[in-house]
Image (cartoon, rainbow, N blue to C red):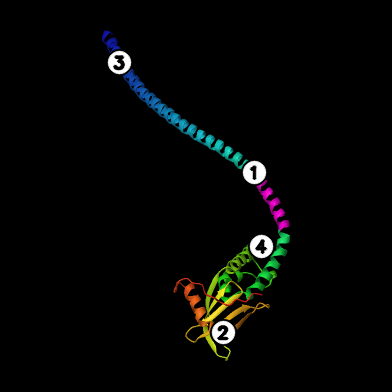
Amino acid sequence: MKQRGIAYAWIVLAAGAAWASNDMETTRLNLEKWLETRRLIAREEQEWRVGKELLQERIDLIRKACEALREKIETTRKESAETAGQLAALRKRNETLKTGMTPLHHDIKGLELRTLAILPWTPEPVRQRVAPLSQRIPANPKDSKLTVTERFQNVIGTLNELNKSARELAVSGEVRKLADGRQAEVTVFYIGLSQAYYVNAKSGVAGIGMLGPEGTWAWHEDNRLAGVIEEALGIYRGERPAAYVALPVSVK
């Protein structure tokens, strides 16, 4: 009986040892799982904090962008209101200008026609000089596509050049018909807009030109003036020293 009791004791101890061994292994496994779970939780918490910070930064950026957009909208609204006021003022001014331009449209038509009527009376070199402006003046004012301002500029520019030419000398090469029916190349010396002299020193041809009452130039041959006119041309060109030259002048 004693031996049997000892055997039972060994069996119980062995079972207890086996149970203890299994329990420790289970505990170890459970501890490892717990630690792994804690690591996962810590990682998730860290990622959540980082994600939260990033999300907060984005929220702040969006909030600032919204505030800037609100300010811009308010500024644009104010500028739009100011622009609308300026536009209304400009429209009112434009209407006033249109009303004031009506008589100017009528005036420019008469000025254009009278300016074109003057041109045939002027010497050829003068007409060539004002051509860039005078050619922009329409023969029929109704056909003009220019603005009133441009039309006034053309008329005023042409008249200014004509006024300047009335106080200046001009020289041009032209062809004159002589008393015997021949034609000769001559140098024409214009004084202002109403008196002129022509000469061909080699041929001994000379004469006087005067503006007629109908706006046409009348030429009178007078070969006796060839030397005097040639001398005046030489002084004008700087080929001869300055001196008094007597030229006949007809005043009407």
Q: What residue do we see at 48% from left, 33% from top? A: 57
x and y percentages locating residue 218 in the rendered image: 62, 81
Label the magenta part by its dominant secondary structure: helix
Name which residue type carries label 4.
Val
Name which residue type carries label 1.
Glu
Camera-nearest residue between 202 and 182 = 202
Most extreme residue toward the left is: 3
- Position of residue 160 in the picture relative to residue 244 (left or right): right
Sequence order check, earlier mark of 2 and 4: 4
Report crowding for label 3: few under 14, some 14 to 19, many 20 or more residues within 10 A (C-alpha): few
**Where does label 2 land, which residue?**
222
x and y percentages locating residue 61 in the rendered image: 50, 35
Q: Which mark is residue 11?
A: 3
**Where does label 4 land, which residue?**
148
Which is closer to the viewer, label 2 or label 4?
Answer: 2
Asked whether disc 2 touches disc 3, contact meaning CB atoms under 8 Å apart, the reply is no
Q: Is residue 167 above or below residue 77?
A: below
Q: Which residues are magenta?
A: 83-100
